Amino acid sequence: MTWFAVDDSAYAHPKMLKAGNAAIGLWVRCGAYCSAHLTDGIVPGAIASMYGTPPQIRKLIIVGLWHENGHNCGRCPQPPHGDYVMHDYLAGANFSKKQVLDRRAKAAAKKRSQRAGAENRARIDPESNADRGRNGDESSSIHRPVFDEATGQPAASRGDSDGTRARAFPSPPLPTSGTEREEGEPPRAVGHEALSLVPESWQPDSETIAAAQAARTAAGRPVLTGAQLQELTRKFIRRQRNSGRLTTPAAAADRWIDWAERERPADTQQPPLLLGLPGGQPGPAWPHEQPQQRTQPRDETWTPPSWSEQRAQLEAQIAADNARDTG
């Protein structure tokens, strides 16, 4: 692409002011035509008549912006008969046809050289672009990572690919120790804990239990008894094994502490408020009832009945109502 150069002071040049806006519009359009078609400033008469009017052409000739055939300007060439030449077209910043063609030829030669060099490198390179892509796919399939919540690497989300998670791949395993492993035994890496299911015989150690009790105390929950800890551990092992989740001993202990912190044993859960028993009998007087709901004065030593006592009371009332209805 070439450009038609217009000096930034042209708006106030005397020739421009004398020619007027209409004639200057013709001058600019024909200048762009000369630059695009590499005419070295020659304006064909047909183009001048198509873009402008005879009075506009005459103004450009009178003020000296254009010359017609037979002019006496020593700096501008003679145009063919019926055509015009732009004054000082090649004396300014406009390029001649030879200059433009030379620049284009050099640019084309440079591009050919670059392409030839790229093709030569592709032929002599033992690992071409296609090989790189194939080798990359094989490498990603070999080193596919195993993710686990305990290691801080969650499972791949939908839409993830090996390429988008390349930085999450684990490092190659470290060399194994000098001891020989038995046939069929999975390889062990020095400094890496193997992933496996939580063993059925797994039990938290004293430090793990102390950490769990401290977490419950900090959260304002009562500490767990020995029986509650055993029941919690039983449920924890069953849930972890049923889900098929792989973990390490250290990660299992951390996860067990989270379970223990959130554990709410059955005997510590507050039973729902019974508004009344079958047969229209009022329910037991709860400490949080309003005064008008109580059927007897509050006993400061009174404690809410347990679940078993409430169930026995409810079953007795149901049996009495059934006996009264059938009698």
Image (cartoon, grey):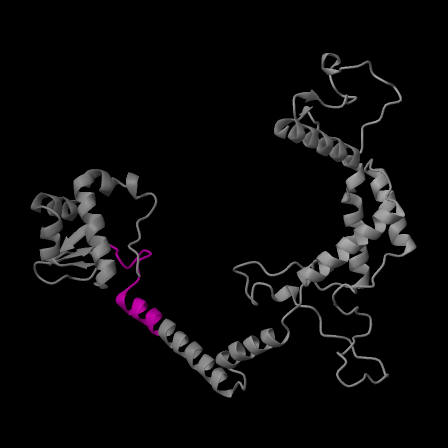
In the rendered image, residue 199, in percent from the top left (x then y), is placed at 79, 65
Q: Which residue, as the protein is rendered here, is positioned at the far right? A: 206
**Of 152 and 211, the residue lying toward us:** 211
Residue 20, visible in the rendered structure: no
Residue 74 higher or lower than 225, as above or below: below
Where does the N terminus fall, quadrant-wise?
A: bottom left
Question: Horizontally, is 80 left or right of 31 in the view?
Answer: left
**Of 189 and 71, the residue lying toward us:** 189
**Of 230 and 246, the residue lying toward us:** 230
In the rendered image, residue 30, in percent from the top left (x then y), is placed at 19, 53
Question: Horizontally, is 318 left or right of 121 in the view?
Answer: right
Question: Horizontally, is 110 left or right of 199 in the view?
Answer: left
Q: Which residues are magenta?
A: 88-105
Q: Quadrant of residue 236?
A: bottom right
Q: Is residue 130 magenta?
A: no
Q: Which residue, as the protein is rendered here, is positioned at the far front? A: 327
Q: Residue at x 79, y 69 (%)?
A: 192
In the rendered image, residue 159, in percent from the top left (x then y), is placed at 52, 60
